[in-house]
Amino acid sequence: MTYQFDFSFLQQYWPDLLRGVWLTIRMTLLATVPGFVLGVALAVGRLHGNKPLSAAIRSYIEVIRNTPLVLQVFWIFFGLAAIRMHVPALEAAVVALIVNVSAYTAEIMRAGLESIHDSQVEAASCLAMSRTQVLWYIEIPQAVEKMYPALVSQFMLMLLATSIMSQISADELTGVADLIQSITFRGFEAYAVIAVIYLVLASGLRVLLLSAGSLLFPRLRTTLATGGRA
């Protein structure tokens, strides 16, 4: 018997899908800024901290980058519950995303900080700038500018990674699709629609972040205008 494709039934589930879209966006927004700030702090601590601090940060980054995100969220949601520390699904999802993206952001920012020539730091020192001022006004802004496209890609991946949070019953977009599929038994149509929604969300996030970056960083605007050849 030939399978009959039918997308019309999804009309009654659009309110649920829209709520899933909003929760996906909300989790991404709640995790992006704290994850970025923590990642920058980790990168600075790894490069300029004392040996024990640098070693601890390096170990943290390696553990997070070499374990699955789904395992990390399971540990926060189910693992902490085992010791009577109950974390709601949304909070567990956001914390897991922050922890995960911070480790990847730390490595991206470390590469950006290491790319800054020592002469700039020496020149700033000659102007009697403190180490904190050098980091805040010279190193970090340039590192962000140089690594901005990589950071944008990482934040896009984080948006897509929110789909994993359906495993802890978070009603984001994939969780809603799972529910629709379990009711209608039309998985192809349900997952095809959310694939398109994810594509729109990820593309929109990329355009938004790159547009914001082109306004903040003139050299990035030139690079984007020339297709990355500048």
Image: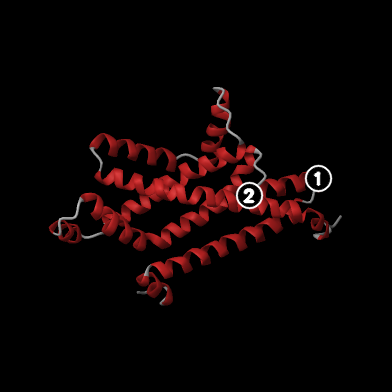
Residue named by callout 2: 23
Describe residue 34's horizontal placement relative to residue 29 as left or right. left
Please name which of the two marks, 1 or 2, marks the residue nearer to the observer. 2
Residue 148 placement (x, y as % from top left): 40, 61
Describe residue 6's horizontal placement relative to residue 145 as left or right. right
Closer to us: 154 or 185: 154
Residue 190 placement (x, y as % from top left): 74, 54
Closer to us: 143 or 74: 143
Q: Which label was assigned to residue 3?
A: none
Disc 1 residue type (three-letter) = Ile
Describe residue 95's horizontal placement relative to residue 146 as left or right. right
Residue 210 placement (x, y as % from top left): 47, 66
Q: Quadrant of residue 222?
A: bottom left
Q: Residue furthest left?
A: 126
Mark before the other along the chain sequence, 1 or 2: 2
Closer to us: 135 or 2: 135
Residue found at x 53% / y 48%: 30
Residue named by callout 1: 183
Q: Secondary structure at mark 2?
A: helix
Q: Residue furthest right?
A: 1
